[in-house]
Image (cartoon, coloured by chain):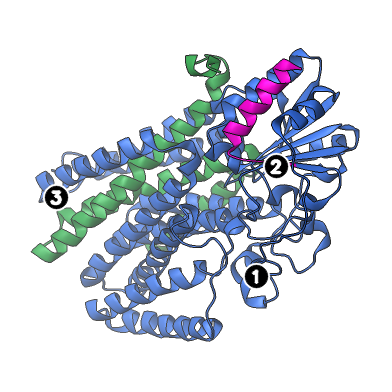
Chain colours: A green, B blue
């Protein structure tokens, strides 16, 4: 791909990235960080490509290691963020454990 | 399989990228946060499925098995982790992402042809490995596997300067020759660098560093997108890099720190004032009944919850006590410091888990003017966030951090495990004030005793 094209994507994405989180309250800093953390787990796509093109055993093993790490980042990241946010919505549907004294 | 045409592939990646943008946007507001996160997961799913359908891949069985294993490890880990330990889990997830990016770039070395390409490879290897080892150290600090104080050794600044130069030279050589040997060297330099950068960071600043490393992993992923010519990686990584940078600055300013001060503060020296003294100055300690009387005859009580409350799993008991006081007509609010707990907003998550209504949680700016009129400030398992040293002691590691003005209340009650200093490792003069009462013990035990005594009043 044309490198100038990639540069265009990069610069535009920088501005979008700044813009979308510019008004976040401190309450949501942790979930936002965790969500952003999950999003960069998309490196899994890169790891899959590299593993799929590996032409020797050691490369395949290393690439599969990358697949493993990236999967943990991606899947775990979204699950743990969801768990955090579940707590925020938890006021409406009262759970039984809250009543125990 | 290459079932999909290039156009369809590009469109699906675009869809995934839009999902990520909407996810970050959603996560910035409480109402849409959960939906935002699910959108992000949808985008990720579309992205991963697309790569299988669009690329000519071998070893697919292996890849799928490893993905299944990774999910089988990470889902239970995320589901079962205590909410108090969540920050270190996020740090760990961030680190493995950085590690994955470094490995991906490393393996692409042999395919590298152009100069720009090789620069992107070198960048990804180095930044990814810094992020990996740095995150491992933050994990160890948060998990208290190692000391939470800044760790320094003699000549550390020199070592870091030398290492930086070595890394730069290594990166340049790698760009010129592109051998796996130099790639490995750069990987190693990055790993050492990550350790050295994070070691001198004091416990209270660790969240800022996690956020910074998160942004760095984002940039490494973006660079790996350049390496692989994959727009989704480029856009998603850049989004995280940019939003993460902004978030890091927002967090730092919520703690009254600058980002550079966080990283290099320990090198300026004099910042560990009072960190090791375990004081034998006299304090006034009371019984649960004394505390109950103070609380029971107050009109306004402000509760300042801290990490100790969360560690003792005392959120529910805390809320019971607040309700018991309210039944007596006492006005109770919770003053939440932005960094109460281990990360910004962590305490809100923990109290929400205990069904404490959102309305009684007040942020620092709201609650600070109210301390003057409060009869009792009940500090449960918090220390640094009410430490007046942040205002008065210029050499203190937390100097400049905004604090809750607990000392302005007529009476201050600390529920503490021991006289051990807080996470930042510094003494709190507020403990020795004449209007301060201490109740030692596990937060949950103490709170249930106080609760019993309040009910008996």
Labels 3 and 1 positioned on one and the same chain: yes
Query: Which residue corresponds to mark 2?
Result: B337
Q: With B435 as the anchor, is B115 left or right in this view?
A: left
Q: Is residue B132 visible?
A: yes
- Look at the image and say whether residue B37 sits in the magenta stretch: no
The part of the chain drawn in magenta is B438-457
What chain does mark 1 sit on?
B
Query: Which residue corresponds to mark 3?
Result: B57
Determine the secondary structure under disc 1: helix
Q: In which quarter of the image is residue B401?
A: bottom right
The residue under the point 73% across, 56% down is B256
The residue under the point 32% across, 43% down is B10
What chain does mark 3 sit on?
B
Q: With B120 as the anchor, is B110 left or right in this view?
A: left
Residue B382 point in image, percent of width and height? 66, 44
N-term mark: 3 or 2: 3
């Amino acid at each position: 791909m044309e490198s100038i094209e990639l540069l265009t994507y990069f610069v535009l994405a920088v501005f979008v990235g700044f813009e979308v989180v510019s008004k976040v309250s401190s309450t949501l800093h942790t979930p936002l960080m965790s969500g952003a953390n999950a999003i960069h787990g998309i490196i899994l796509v890169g790891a899959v490509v590299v593993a799929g093109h590996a032409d020797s055993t050691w490369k395949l093993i290393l690439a599969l290691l990358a697949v493993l790490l990236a999967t943990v980042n991606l899947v775990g990241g979204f699950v743990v963020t969801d768990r955090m946010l579940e707590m925020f919505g938890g006021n409406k549907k009262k759970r039984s454990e809250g009543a125990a004294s | 399989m290459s079932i999909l045409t290039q156009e369809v592939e590009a469109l699906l990646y675009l869809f995934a990228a839009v999902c990520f943008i909407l996810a970050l946007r959603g996560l910035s507001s409480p109402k849409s946060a959960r939906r935002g996160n699910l959108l992000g997961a949808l985008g990720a799913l579309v992205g991963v499925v697309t790569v299988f359908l669009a690329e000519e891949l071998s070893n697919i069985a292996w890849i799928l098995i490893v993905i299944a294993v990774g999910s089988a490890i990470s889902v239970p880990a995320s589901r079962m982790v205590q909410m108090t330990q969540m920050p270190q889990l996020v740090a760990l997830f961030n680190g493995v992402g950085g590690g994955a990016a470094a490995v991906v770039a490393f393996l692409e070395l042999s395919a590298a042809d152009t100069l720009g390409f090789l620069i992107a490879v070198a960048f990804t290897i180095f930044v990814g490995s810094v992020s990996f080892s740095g995150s491992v150290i933050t994990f160890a600090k948060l998990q208290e596997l190692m000391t939470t104080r800044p760790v320094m050794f003699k000549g550390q600044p020199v070592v870091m300067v030398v290492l930086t130069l070595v890394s730069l030279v290594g990166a340049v050589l790698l760009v010129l020759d592109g051998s796996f040997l130099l790639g490995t060297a750069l990987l190693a330099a990055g790993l050492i660098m990550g350790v050295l950068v994070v070691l001198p960071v004091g416990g209270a600043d660790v969240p800022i560093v996690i956020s910074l490393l998160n942004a760095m992993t984002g940039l490494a992923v973006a660079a790996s997108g350049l390496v692989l010519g994959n727009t989704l990686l480029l856009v998603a990584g850049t989004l995280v890099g940019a939003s993460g940078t902004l978030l890091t600055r927002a967090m730092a300013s919520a703690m009254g720190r600058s980002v550079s001060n966080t990283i290099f503060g320990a090198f300026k020296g004099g910042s560990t004032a009072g960190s090791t003294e375990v004081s034998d100055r006299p304090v006034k300690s009371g019984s649960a009944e004394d505390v109950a009387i103070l609380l029971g005859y107050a009109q306004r009580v402000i509760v300042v919850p801290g990490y100790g409350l969360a560690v003792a799993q005392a959120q529910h008991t805390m809320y019971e006590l607040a309700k018991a006081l309210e039944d007596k007509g006492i006005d109770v609010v919770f003053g939440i410091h932005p960094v109460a707990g281990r990360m910004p907003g962590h305490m809100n998550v923990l109290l929400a888990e205990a069904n404490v209504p959102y309305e009684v949680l007040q942020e620092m700016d709201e609650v600070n003017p109210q301390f003057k009129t409060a009869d009792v400030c009940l500090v449960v398992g918090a220390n640094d966030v009410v430490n007046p040293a942040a205002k008065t002691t210029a050499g203190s590691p937390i100097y400049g951090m905004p604090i809750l003005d607990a000392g302005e209340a007529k009476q201050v009650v600390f529920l503490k495990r021991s006289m051990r200093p807080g996470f930042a490792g510094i003494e709190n003069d507020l403990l020795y004030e004449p209007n301060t009462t201490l109740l030692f013990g596990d937060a949950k035990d103490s709170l249930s005793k106080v609760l019993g005594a309040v009910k008996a009043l």
